[in-house]
Image (spheres, rainbow, N blue to C red):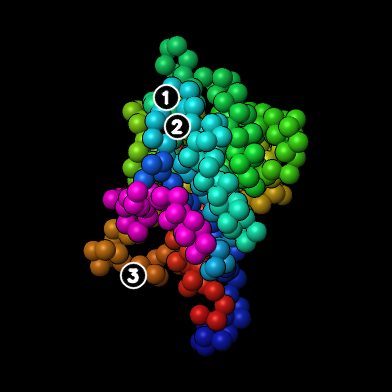
Amino acid sequence: MRQSPAVRRLVSETDAVPRRLVLPLFVREGLAEPVPIGSMPGVVQHTMDSLRRAATDAAEVGVGGVMLFGVPAVRDAQGSGADDPNGILNLATTALAQEVGDALVVQTDLCLDEFTDHGHCGVLAPDGTVDNDASLERYASMALAQARAGSAMLGLSGMMDGQVGHVRAALDAEGFTDTLILAYSAKYAGAFYGPFREAVDSQLKGDRRTYQMDPGNAREGVREALLDVDEGADVVMVKPALPYLDVLAEVRASVDVPVWAYQVSGEYAMVEAAAANGWIDRRGAILESLTAIRRAGADVILTYWAAEAARWLSPGR
Ligand code: PBG
């Protein structure tokens, strides 16, 4: 069955199509020009204008959604920029919802780390540890701000216990019953988010091991996904993607909601660096990684290559 291209095409089990890709985008407050991210060649911190153009481009090539991250000019201990209606992320959300909201799904990262001066995903207790339940109150307020701004789907990436149920209840109480929740259920603490820290000018010292997961734990990933479904998640996610395909496959087999995967900044940087050195076929490696993540069970993939890959994958190309 492998001899002719026509048969191979006919019997191929897995494909990645543009609608299954979501493009993460960074927008930074007060920028005059887009700023390249050194550790993620080809990815930038956007101005409001360049953000609009990037989202329109993505919509034109058929990408299924965009995931927005905001980089505020000022940070504080509570992450006040996160639920400020005039905060950069909320303003950008409204702009994109108007511009491309009919063509693709405008999603927002719901986490405090971009907005706090200590760089943690929640607020801190007096002893310096992350206070889970106090952080949930901040998430509820952030969720309402994002929903009011026009976000169609909130990406809960903070890994606080009970965050899905808490945010769902807050949204429903204010009438945002149709605002979707994408739960970053199995999010592992590790080295692959390194370039992202540069992308959002993260202030983090130390690590996130008290709330993100131990890379060795697969059963716990499934348990987290089941809990999130129970609390009302519309979609669950595994993150990073390529180093966690086994977890992805197990989660896929365990839940009946869509399962997404996030091909994170470190996965992107590895391929780009190897390709820049002439050590790997860039396009081949990108498409193979997307196919592998789909094969393992991801319905949708968040990837910084979404727009470029969508161009390659569009029918007729
Ligand atoms: C939290 C968040 C992070 C990423 C997505 N959402 C950072 C973290 O958890 O450390 C990482 C994405 C990537 O590395 O591409 N706001």
Residue 317, x across and y down, in percent = 51, 80
Q: Which residue is mark 2?
A: 115
Quadrant the N terminus occupies: bottom right
Could you tell whether 59 is left or right of 215 in the image? right
Residue visible at 35% across and 48% down?
32
Residue visible at 58% across and 75% down?
12
Which amino acid type corresponds to the residue marked 2 in the rendered image?
Phe
Answer with mark 3 or mark 1, whichever residue precedes in sequence.
Answer: 1
- Mark 2, ligand 1, within 8 Å: the answer is no
Q: Which residues are magenta?
A: 32-58
Residue 209, x across and y down, in percent = 43, 29
Which element carries disc 3, helix, strand or loop? loop
* Cα distance between the residues tagged 2 and 1: 7 Å
- Is the C-beta separation of discs 2 and 1 under 8 Å? yes
Answer with mark 3 or mark 2, whichever residue precedes in sequence.
Answer: 2
Return the mark for residue 76: 1
Q: Quadrant of residue 20?
A: bottom right
